[in-house]
Image (spheres, rainbow, N blue to C red):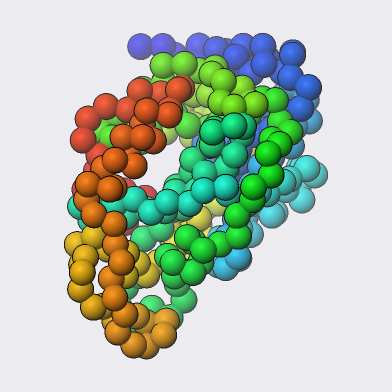
Amino acid sequence: MRTFAEKETEALNLIGAQMATAKNPIVLCSFGKDSIALLHLCLRFRKVPVLFFRFSKFHEKHQHAMDVMKQWDLEAYDMWPEVIYEYQHGEFFEVLHGYKTGLLANIYLFSGIRKREEGETRYLCAVEDLLARPRSFVNTYPWDVTFHGHKGTDDPEIGKAGAITQPVSQLGDTTVAVPFTDWTDEDIWTYIRKYDLPYDRQRYAGDETTSPDKYPTCYRCLDTQLIGQTVECPKYERPIQNIARTEAQHDAFRKELVGQLQYCEVIGEPRRTPNVAHL
């Protein structure tokens, strides 16, 4: 097993090699613990912009990111997705957003949602706030290198494990660099403590108020477990028809998505338990 120092050195070597030739690099950054460590590693070479995706509601979940952007004087961009899909397996439900990086190429990111609890009045509607959000059909992705903070030890959500097999791979018009090949959560925290990096203490103390990993979301009309039924819509306060995809359709989408991943190998059955049990 490699030491933390060895992992840090390898990550710096990988980032440095990409920075040496990149004309316009960018860092995918949610400002969670993994991406803040990645951003700091990249900034040790040169000033680099961030790509920060956000929703139109729950602005308190964006506050930590905005604070760090201001503190570090960051150049930050946002994008609308080109494609949006809902995916379900058992009780696990998510909405994936595909951000176009080239012809037939997208970076897919999860929304980070949890099931709305009865009585909650602040929540996202999976149909109107997620699936029907504005989309972009621009054919250019201006960043030639994209740094991604996925760790080889992360739960891939669409499989049991997802080892990083290609730390550097091509995805459309961008090179995707994934430096955390075998970093663990403890390695990330060691790096954050070593360099005294800002992180959302409230979020990592277990308070979901500021966590962008937990957006309360109503998806009754898309829940495969209720397919064909009439469900009560809390937004319009009336019964509506469930329009969920079938299990076979969800599984076909998962296999298509797994087949498009180049930097990691997803193996095993996907999770069946709800998001709140993992986030």
Q: Position of residue 123 (x, y in %)?
A: 45, 72
Q: Is any atom of residue 141 visible in this view?
A: yes
The percent coordinates of residue 196 (x first, y second) are 62, 37
Picture quadrant of residue 223: bottom left
In the image shown, does 167 or 184 lie closer to the viewer? 167
* Towards the viewer: 18 or 13: 18
Q: Position of residue 89 (x, y in %)?
A: 24, 49
Question: Along the line of sight, which residue is nearer the eye, 52 or 182?
Answer: 52
Query: Which of the 4 quarters of the picture holds residue 114?
Result: bottom left
Horizontal side of 113 relative to 54 (left or right) equals left
Q: Residue at x 26, y 78 (%)?
A: 231
* Side of 158 where 208 appears, left or right: right
Q: On the rendered image, what quadrant is the N terminus found in?
A: top left
Q: Residue at x 43, y 29 (%)?
A: 260
Can residue 274 be seen here? The reply is no
Question: 215 or 40, which is in the foreground?
Answer: 215
Residue 214: x percent and y percent?
Answer: 43, 58
Residue under the point 73% across and 45% down:
76
Q: Toward which corner of the image does residue 38 lie, by quadrant?
A: top right
Where 46 sits versus 63, above or below? above
